[in-house]
Amino acid sequence: MNDDRDEPLLRVQGLGHRFPGAAEAAVREVDLTLHPGEVVAIVGESGSGKSTLLDCIAGRLVPQQGEVRYRTRASQWVDVHAMPERQRRELARTEWGHVVQHAHEGLRMRVSAGANIGERLMALGRRHHGQLRAQAGDWMRRVELDDGRIDDLPGAFSGGMRQRLQIARNLVTHPRLVLMDEPTTGLDVSVQARLLDLLRLLVSRLHLSALVVTHDLGVARLLAHRTVVMQHGRIVEQGLTDRVLDDPRHPYTQLLVSSVVTP
Ligand SMILES: Nc1ncnc2c1ncn2[C@@H]1O[C@H](COP(=O)(O)OP(=O)(O)OP(=O)(O)O)[C@@H](O)[C@H]1O
């Protein structure tokens, strides 16, 4: 089925979340729309609410206000927080991918690289060992890992390679929406640059939609069609990435872009 490009894939409306005991809300009145094939970066300084917003969208946190609606492959709109937990997990397995900053949290460290990639396919009911292994090898090559290392444990790979492995594990099932939280943070600069090139290539080849939380405006510049800027839990500015970064209108974005505020 072709995605209707005019119809969004994800709609966030009036989202708000305050952690128990916190004086202020971590996320307030956030409205956000994501279309098929679109990459949106969420930027802002530390503590501005980026990860909390992503966690609310992913269903890992239950927001106190607002709603998150997602349009499934079957073109049905579902309310992520109103659906039963079992159904939400099914959605996360079949239609979504989730790439986290620390690859060891997104991988199973006690099973091989190949098994890490094959696991999501198995969750979809694939059982043929030879085919699972072949697909895992294929995905290792796609993320530029040596498929001769298919039986190695993730711990035997470097940080950048582990992140590639996490990406392969997520993309093997062809998700429609990928949520990424600081996917390149903490890696060496040259490793980051190669990983970003790879992500950009995969996102465009697979026509993925992605939300990318990053404190690095360079990541937004390279990956994202649109950028939203958060301050104190609110979106203060959003627009096409080049416009937001080259011609920022909100004073906070101007400070962020001129590095007066460290993201
Ligand atoms: N589990 C939690 N319990 C209580 N407060 C939290 C929790 N997680 C985050 N916060 C608070 O919510 C606010 C937003 O945090 P969040 O991690 O979403 O920001 P962020 O922009 O992602 O920052 P960073 O880039 O440092 O991860 C902060 O004030 C933070 O201290």
Image (cartoon, helix red, strand yellow):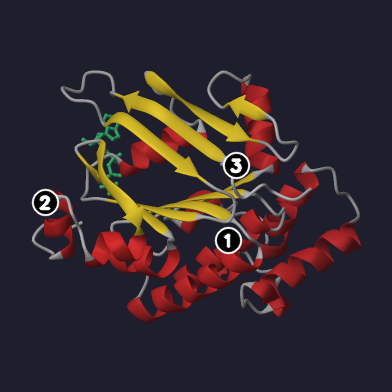
The answer to which image quadrant residue 143 occupies is bottom right
Sequence-wise, the earlier of marks 2 and 1 is 1
- The amino acid type of the residue labelled 2 equals Pro
Identified by mark 3, the residue type is Glu
Is residue 114 visible in the rendered structure shown here? yes
Disc 1 crowd, CA 10 A, few/some/many (<14, 14-19, 20+):
many
Q: Judge: label 3 CB < 8 Å from ligand 1.
A: no
Q: Is residue 89 left or right of residue 68?
A: right
- SS class, disc 2: helix
Q: Which mark is residue 167?
A: 1
* Residue 172, position as x, y percentages in the image: 70, 58
Nearest the viewer among 173 and 244 is 244
Residue 195, compared with residue 213, is above or below; it is: below
Callout 3 environment at 10 Å: few (<14), some (14 to 19), or many (20+)? Answer: few
> At 49% across and 75% down in the image, what residue appears?
197
Q: Are marks 2 and 3 in contact (CB under 8 Å)?
A: no
Q: Which residue in the structure is indicated by mark 3?
A: 7
- The residue sitting at 38% across, 81% down in the picture is 190
